[in-house]
Image (cartoon, rainbow, N blue to C red):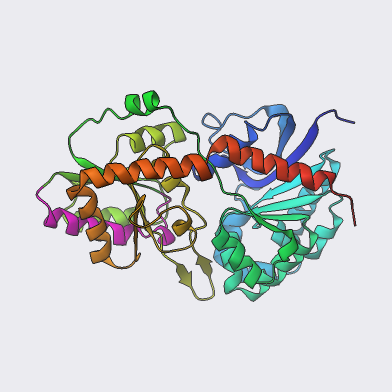
Amino acid sequence: MHNKTKILFVQEVFGRLSEVFLYRMLTNMDDVDVHVLTGDYINQQIFPFEPAKMTIWRESKVPLSEKMFPLIRKVLRLQGSYSSETTKVIAAINRSDADLVCFQFSSLPVLFGKEIEKIEKKCCVIHHGSDVNLAVEHKTYHKRLKILWEKMDQIIFISHFLMKTALDLGCPKEKATVIYLGVPLLSKDTISRLREKDNDRIRFICVARIVPVKNHLTLVKAFAELVKATDKEVELLLIGSGELEKRTQQTIKTLHMDRHIKMLGAMGNEQVLLEIAKSDCVILISNQYTVKGRIHQEEGLGLSLVEGGGMGLPMIGSRSGGIPEVVQDNINGYLVDPMNIEEIKNAMIKIVNDPIKSTSMGENAKAMVATDFNLDIQIKKFRSMFMSIIQKDPE
């Protein structure tokens, strides 16, 4: 028997740069013995984790979900696909003496199908975005997701948008709850120290994977219109990597925006925070992305907006997914139609032309983050939820 409450977090790949909140939660959960079961452990220098608490189950070189998503329907229709690997994961879970198993995303456990009943632990899942949205169009995935939900003792969503989507898909209401992700609140002195800009340009920043749902191509085109519409010096920083990097670079070149738009690639969170601090506005105009028969995505929340708002930056976000739960139009930023280039450009012009209002909206954003997205408070909410699941009597 162990003295501390033990929670086993199961995630297919641990250490993705875009999933910094998970690492923050694992390393800041007081009085809980946290262990991780994963198929792969990457970016170990950025996300150092105690080796004795890390179990890697995968032997193949390609993560299951990266195999799965491009051919999601075929994979889910083939009973027994990856059966040896899923069996290995279930066996590893049952060998653990954890009091609770917490799945990050449903993309892995949904592959278990009815085999998930073999797990002999209390379980919960945290849904972050596409792992719910995919079920909107994929009947087989939806069917498996409902099997997963029946097994879970609790189903956690990072936004009300995601929970509503899941409830419409048949998620048991009595098991569903929303807990927002959180970001660390930095002191005024820390923000001031970080905010030593290296030029006088008005800087917009977008931190996101460069994939279709994040809508970078529309952002680049809108920013090109901003450059034409103002005589002030402006720049756009794009931080992230993904399948549309080359196309985005080509679009920037075609529009002759090389001097104004910089692509910095993927960065660790400390570097990201530094670049956000040196910016004047954080922007994320994610759009619904869907290709019939392949994939469906919509923004779960938009944590990069929260990071910027926490530093006192005004935000520009799209009316898409969970973003309106972060951006309050004309109060802490501007909400825009993600495919309306003119509307996106006009929002950026307002940031450029009205620095007093921009500063005021930034202060409102900072206050909102302190209330609704405070890292310490949100981690306590997750911990409290985990403990309530563990202490719940079996039915």
Q: Label the magenta part by its dominant secondary structure.
A: helix
Q: Position of residue 181 (x, y in %)?
A: 56, 45
Is residue 268 or residue 133 the one in the foreground? 133
Coordinates of residue 38 in the picture (x, y in percent): 67, 43
Does residue 160 show up magenta in the picture? no
Q: Position of residue 294 (x, y in %)?
A: 53, 70
Q: Is residue 265 visible?
A: no
Give the side of residue 274 with respect to residue 257, left or right. right
Name which residue lies at 66% across and 43% down: 382
Instruction: Look at 50% across and 39% down and name the residue there.
Output: 183
Check the image and report above or below for 174 versus 237. below
**Which quarter shows the C terminus?**
bottom right
Left or right position of 298 against 386: left
Locate residue 308: give its quadrant. top left
Which quadrant is home to the N terminus? top right
Spot occupied by residue 201 in the image (x, y as percentages of width and height): 18, 39
Q: Is residue 217 above or below residue 367?
A: below
Q: Nearer the viewer, residue 190 or 210?
A: 190
Q: At 72% from the left edge and 31% from the top edge, which residue is drawn?
A: 53
The one of 376 and 100 positioned closer to us in this rendering? 376
Q: Residue at x 75, y 60 (%)?
A: 112
Magenta residues span: 208-231
